């Protein structure tokens, strides 16, 4: 089941969940009617003792179904192969292919790395739009990422295919 721009228009809620047992279990326990109006963003990191991103993605795919997948870059939560996945070579090809190989229900959230070339980020966004039809951009630092976000949105074929998540962190 793929995700398209009409799905973005119908979203009632876009939860951001980490790939942790409790958060995945909580999502699983939601009623089907509730799940129909949401598509989660899963922040891919360790799942208990599982530190391999492929195995974590398998669990996410089995337990959540359709989702946008972002990469958790916090060192104490990141998968062991995170350095391979944040490599900007060929427009983050390793990241895009890892999600593609995980199944049709998962879509990659473009990786924003401050030190990476702008061109690689923008091409990554364009390639995700080409391959999946929609893109979710998630910024944890909107002030720092503003130029990258604006440039990426202006480079896509249709801005209606882009959903921007400005994530200001936890609310306390």
Image: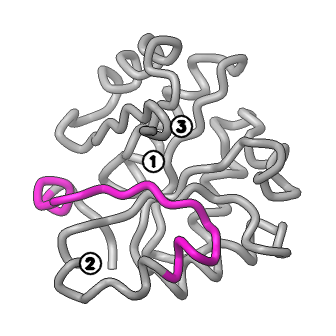
Residue beneath disc 2: 35
Of the two numbered discs 1 and 2 in the rendering, the one whose residue sits closer to the viewer: 2
Residue beneath disc 1: 128
Q: Report whether 33 appears left or right of 124.
A: left
Give above or below for 142 relative to 125.
above
x and y percent of residue 21 in the render? 63, 77
x and y percent of residue 122 in the render? 49, 26
Choose between 28 and 10: the one closer to the eye.
28
* Quadrant that contains the C terminus: top left
Q: Which one is earlier in the sequence, the residue at label 1 or at label 2?
A: 2
Residue 66 is one of the magenta-drawn residues: no
Disc 1 from disc 2: Cα separation? 24 Å
Magenta part of the chain? 6-25
x and y percent of residue 40 in the render? 39, 63
Q: Which residue is drawn at 57% across and 66% down?
A: 100
Q: Helix, strand, or loop for circle 1?
A: helix
Residue 7 is one of the magenta-drawn residues: yes
* Quadrant that contains the N terminus: bottom left
Choose between 48 and 121: the one closer to the eye.
48
Residue beneath disc 3: 124
Tag 1 and tag 3, C-beta contact below 8 Å: yes
Of the two numbered discs 2 and 3 in the rendering, the one whose residue sits closer to the viewer: 2
Give above or below for 23 relative to 31.
above
Tag 1 and tag 2, C-beta contact below 8 Å: no
Q: Helix, strand, or loop for circle 3?
A: helix
Give above or below for 76 relative to 6.
above
x and y percent of residue 41 in the render? 44, 57
Choose between 154 and 38: the one closer to the eye.
38
């Amino acid at each position: 089941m793929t995700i398209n721009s009409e799905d973005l228009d119908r979203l009632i809620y876009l939860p951001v969940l980490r790939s942790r047992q409790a958060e995945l279990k909580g999502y699983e326990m939601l009623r089907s009617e509730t799940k129909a109006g949401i598509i989660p963003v899963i922040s891919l990191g360790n799942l208990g003792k599982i530190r391999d991103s492929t195995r974590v993605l398998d669990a996410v795919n089995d337990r959540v179904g359709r989702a946008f997948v972002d990469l958790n870059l916090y060192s104490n939560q990141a998968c062991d192969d995170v350095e391979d996945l944040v490599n900007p070579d060929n427009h983050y090809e390793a990241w895009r292919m890892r999600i593609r190989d995980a199944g049709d229900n998962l879509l990659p959230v473009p990786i924003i790395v401050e030190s990476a070339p702008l061109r690689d980020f923008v091409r990554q966004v364009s390639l995700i739009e080409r391959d999946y039809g929609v893109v979710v951009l998630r910024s944890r630092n909107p002030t720092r990422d503003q130029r990258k976000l604006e440039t990426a949105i202006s480079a896509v074929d249709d801005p209606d295919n882009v959903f921007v998540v400005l994530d200001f962190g936890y609310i306390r």
